Amino acid sequence: MSSPQIHLDVWSDFVCPWCFLAASSVKRLQESHNITVTWHAFELRPTGAPRISETYKQRILSSFEQLEAMAKTHYDVSLTMGDWDVNTHRAHIGFKYAESLGKGDVYHDATFKAYWHNTKRLDDDQVLLEVAESIGIDRQAFSEALSTPEYMQAVDIDLHTAQQLEFSGVPALLFSEKYYISGAQPYPELVRILEQIQAREGASSS
């Protein structure tokens, strides 16, 4: 008997290192298990947010070397610190457009890499246009989509839903709309969690 297909909703932000790590685990899970995934927008630095304090910056910098080592050991992912205080709202709008073209996953991956590998500013439309073009999306169409109400509203819905579900941080993973997991879980842990859920869902449907 095959395992039931499970849907996974993930709220994340492109400038969150833990979200980048979680994305690597989720990608492997998509390749190895019977799941579907929907990515949702979350903004760590929304418009109007106060600038990050120097004290908090120093705290992050002091632990970044340890984070780099952990990312490599447990996720096989490299991290490079990009600019601070980056608003990702338009990057999320771009994702919604890419998703409508069937290119959501590749845009998601390329945008993460633009920030965490190449230290690009994701609040720069030229950077987003380069990301879009690199995955085969027309620059002009993408530029127009960044101001299209349909995709802007889709991001707003994600942000509102996160508030309703009381997600205070990301990554936030919701399996089958009822099993909530927080934080970046390494791939083996996600496999364990998913297989438990599949067994539970399979038993309840039999």
Image (cartoon, grey):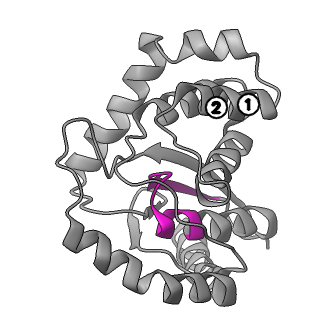
- Tell me the CA gap for discs 2 and 1: 5 Å
Residue linked to disc 1? 102
Q: Is residue 170 above or below residue 193?
A: above
Part of the protein shown in magenta? 6-21
Q: Pointer 2: residues within 10 angstroms few (<14), some, or many (20+)?
A: some
Q: Is residue 16 magenta?
A: yes
Instruction: Indicate the amino acid at tag 2.
Output: Glu
Residue linked to disc 2? 99
Q: Which mark is residue 194?
A: none
Image position, residue 139 (x, y; %): 71, 16
- CB contact under 8 Å: marks 2 and 1: yes
Label 2: which secondary element: helix
- The answer to which of 4 and 98 lies nearer the viewer is 98
> Which residue is located at x 76 percent, y 23 percent?
137
Q: Is residue 37 above or below residue 130?
A: below
Determine the image quadrant of residue 56.
bottom left
Q: Is residue 23 left or right of residue 46?
A: right
